[in-house]
Image (cartoon, rainbow, N blue to C red):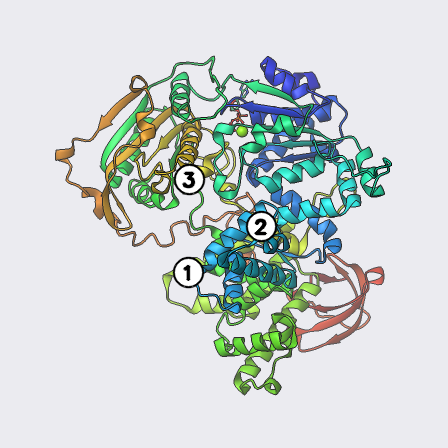
Amino acid sequence: LVRDPETLLDGMNPQQREAVVHAGSPLLIVAGAGSGKTRVLTHRIAYLLGARGVQPGEILAITFTNKAAGEMRERVEALVGPRAKAMWVSTFHSACVRILRRESKRLGFTSSFSIYDAADSQRLMALVCRDLDLDPKQFPPKSFTAKVSNLKNELIDEETYAGQADNAMERKLAEAYALYQRRLREANALDFDDIIMTTVNLLQAFPDAAEHYRRRFRHILVDEYQDTNHAQYMLVRELTGGASGQAPKKTVDGEFVNPAEAALAEIPPAELCVVGDADQSIYAFRGATIRNILDFEEDYPNATTILLEQNYRSTQTILSAANAVIERNSNRRKKNLWTAGAEGTRITSYVADDEHGEAQFIADEIDRLTDAGDAKPGDVAVFYRTNAQSRVFEEVFIRVGLPYKVVGGVRFYERREVRDVLAYLRVLANPEDSVPLRRIINVPKRGIGERAEAMIEALASRERISFPQALLRVDEAYGMAARSANAVKKFNDLMAKLRGVVESGAGPAAVLEAVLEETGYLAELQASTDPQDETRVENLQELAAVALEFEQEEPVEGPDGEPVQTGLPGFLERVALVADSDQIPDEDGEGRGVITLMTLHTAKGLEFPVVFLTGMEDGVFPHMRAMNNTKELEEERRLAYVGLTRARERLYLSRAVLRSAWGQPSYNPASRFLEEIPPTLVDEKRTAAAAVPSLKSGGVGGSGGGFGGRSAGTGTAGGRRSTPAAGWGKNAGRMKDRPTVTLAVGDRVTHDRFGLGTVMAVSGPADDAKATIDFGAEGTKQLLLRYAPVEKL
Ligand code: ATP
Ligand code: MG
C-alpha cells in the first residue's frame, strides 16, 4: 500500500521540499554535512514513484557504497512498497557491470567476464613489466598500476596515451599500458577502472546502446557527487543526455552526420539530480574532482541549484567547530550551517602520553557513558587516519571487554585462503582468466613448479596462444619433464572435473564445496597443526555460508526482463564489488551494539551519537605526506570536516604526545585542525604526565602477538553479514549428507535448474558416476551425480 505521497514532504523544510518535488530541469543540491541531502534523494525517489507516476524501472540512483545503496532501496521500499525492487540503486561500478554484462558482445568479451580488483591488477602489471624486461627499480610496477588507473579515470585509453607519451618513462608506461590491456582482453577481464571507462566508451561508440539506456533511465540521481571523477562525470553525462556541447554533428546543409546520433538527440534528456558538498570531497587521490560540482551549472545550462543550510544531525557546538575548521580552506563557497537543535555539550579534547593511554582513555570514557546510560556501545564510533592505528584500540578493547568491530583493514576477501578458493571459482567461470589460474596452478602444491610455468609461458608466446590454452596443450612433446607433464595433466583433469560440476548445474555453494574437496585444499588445512590454519578453515566456512546465502536470495529481474547475474558469475561479481564500507554494522541488523572502528574515509555519509576522532597530531592527521602541500592539506582539512560532522551529540578529539610508528617513537605536536577549533567550544583533559610512566600499558599485548587473526571470522560479504555456519557440515557438507542418487537408464528425474528429464546413460564408479540426461527443451546434459542437484522421481 502506497502512502499518500504528500506525506513524504512532512517535516521537511521549504528547500528540502522544493528539492523533492522539483521537475523539468537538472537539479543540483549543494549543502553542508548533515543537511539532509541523502534523505532528500530518498524522498525524491519515493515522490517520483508515488506522486509523479514514474515507473521504478525508469530510475537509476547512484550511491557511493553498496551498503548505502541497500539502505536507500530499503527506505524507498518502506515508503512505496515492494515495487521499488525494480529500481537500479547501486554504485557506479555495480550499475556499469550490469550494463556491460548485457552489452559485452559488442565489446568483444563474453558476459561472464572477470573483474580484477586492485591486487589482481597489480599482479597482472607485475607480469607485464617482467615480460617487457623493465627494471623494477627504475619502473616500479606498483606506480605503473597507479598511473594506468589515473589515465583510465581521465578516460585516456592506451592508444591515446601512446600518442602523447614523450619521454622515456612515459613511453615505457605506454608500452606497459598497451600490453596490460591486451592481457586483460585475452583473459576476458576488466579491471575496476575499465568498468567505468568501458561503459563510457560503449555509450559513445554505439548510439543504439546509448539510446536503449536513455529511453530507459528517465531519472538519474547521484549522491556524493563531489567524489565523482572525470570518467564517472562523463558516464552521467552520456546517460542523461542534454549536457552542453552534446548536440549531434551536422553537415553544412544541416543534415545529421550519423542518423543513429540523430535518433538519440530526439530523446529528451533524463531528469538529473545530483547532491553533494564540495567541502566533503576526499577522494582526489582517486581522481575525484570538485570541478564536477563547481561547474555543474555550466555543464547543464538550464540547471536549478538548491542550497540546504539547516543541519539536522549535530549540536550547535559540533557544527561551530566544523565550520571553524573548514573555513580555513580557500576558494570555497561560503556556507552557514545552523541547527534548530540544542547547543549541546562541549567537545572533549584529550592529550595522552602515548597511544596506549589514548586508547585507554577512550575505553574508560565509553565505559563511563554506558554506565551512566548516556550511550550504548553501538552509538560509538572511533575514527583514525590510517588503518594501522586500529591495533592499539583493539588490544585495549579486547582487554577491557568492550565489543567492537573494525571496518576495513585486512579485508576478508584479501585473505590468502579466500583468494585462493575464489581463484578456482574464477577460473571455472572464465577459463581464459590467466591471473587466477596462475595463482592456483600449484596451490595446493602439486609439482607444477616455476620451471614448468615458464615453459608453459614460453609455449604460449611461441604459438601466440593464451597461457590457459598453452596449459592444456603442454606435455612431454614440448620438452617438459615427465613428472611435470604428469602433474599438468592431473591438474587439467581436475579442472575438467570441476567444470563438470559447474555444468551439472550446481550452485556456487556446491561448486565451492567441490573445489575444497577435489583439490585437497581443505584436507591440507585440516591436517595442519598451525593454529592459523584453523582460522583459515573458519574463513572458508564463512565464504561457503556467503555463497549459500547468495544462492538463496531471490533474483531481482529488471523490468525489461534483463537477467540479473545468478550462479557462479553472479556470486563472483558480488564478491568483486564488495567494499570496506559494506562491513559497517547495521543499526538494526547483525553486529548491532558494537563500537565501530574505521578510517575517516570510510566514515563518509554516516552518523553516530558519539564520535572519537583520534590521533589528532600533525604528521598523523594531517598526514605527514600532506604537510608541505597546500592542496593536499586542504584535502586533509576536508577529511577533518567529514570526521567532525559525523557526530550527533558528543565529540571527542584525542592525541598522544608520544606515538610509536613503525617501531620508532615520535613526538608529534597537536594537529593544526585542533588549534583551529575555538577554545570556548572545548574542554581540555590531560593525564598527569609525571604520574604515568611512558608506555606503561605497552605490555598488554603490545607486541601484537595473539591478534594475528584479529578479525578472523568477522568477514562480511555483499554488505550482508551472513550467519556463520554452525559447523562445516551444515553448509558445504550439505551435499555429502545427501547420498548420491543412483540412477538407471530410463529413470525420470527433476533438476533444480533444468527441470524434468529422462536418464539416457549412466557411467563411472558409484562415487564418481555420471549420467546423460535428456531435459527436453533444455537439451541433453552430462551430469556428475555427486554434485548435481537432481532427484529421482
Ligand atoms: P552528509 O553530508 O554527511 O552525507 P546529508 O546531507 O546526506 O549528510 P542526511 O544523512 O540525509 O544528511 O541527514 C542527516 C540527518 O538528519 C539524518 O539523521 C536525517 O534523518 C536527518 N534529517 C534530515 N532532514 C531532516 C528533517 N527535515 N527533519 C528531521 N530530520 C532530518
Ligand atoms: Mg549523505
List x then y, in percent, for residue 732: 56, 59
- What secondary structure is marked by label 1? helix
- The residue lying toward the viewer, choosing from 174 and 721, is 174
- Mark 3 vs mark 2, foreground winner is 2
According to the image, label 1 marks what residue? 534
Q: Alpha carbon of mark 3 to alpha carbon of mark 2: how far? A: 23 Å
Q: Indicate which quadrant contains ligand 2.
A: top right
Quarter holding the N terminus is top right
| Left or right for 490, reference 47 | left
- What secondary structure is marked by label 3? strand
Name the amino acid type tagged 3: Met
According to the image, label 2 marks what residue? 192
> In the figure, 582 relative to 158: above or below?
above
Q: Alpha carbon of mark 1 to alpha carbon of mark 3: how far? A: 27 Å
- Mark 2 vs mark 1, foreground winner is 2
List x then y, in percent, for residue 29: 59, 24
Looking at the image, tell me whether mark 3 or mark 2 is earlier in sequence order: 2
Q: Are marks 3 and 2 in contact (CB under 8 Å)?
A: no
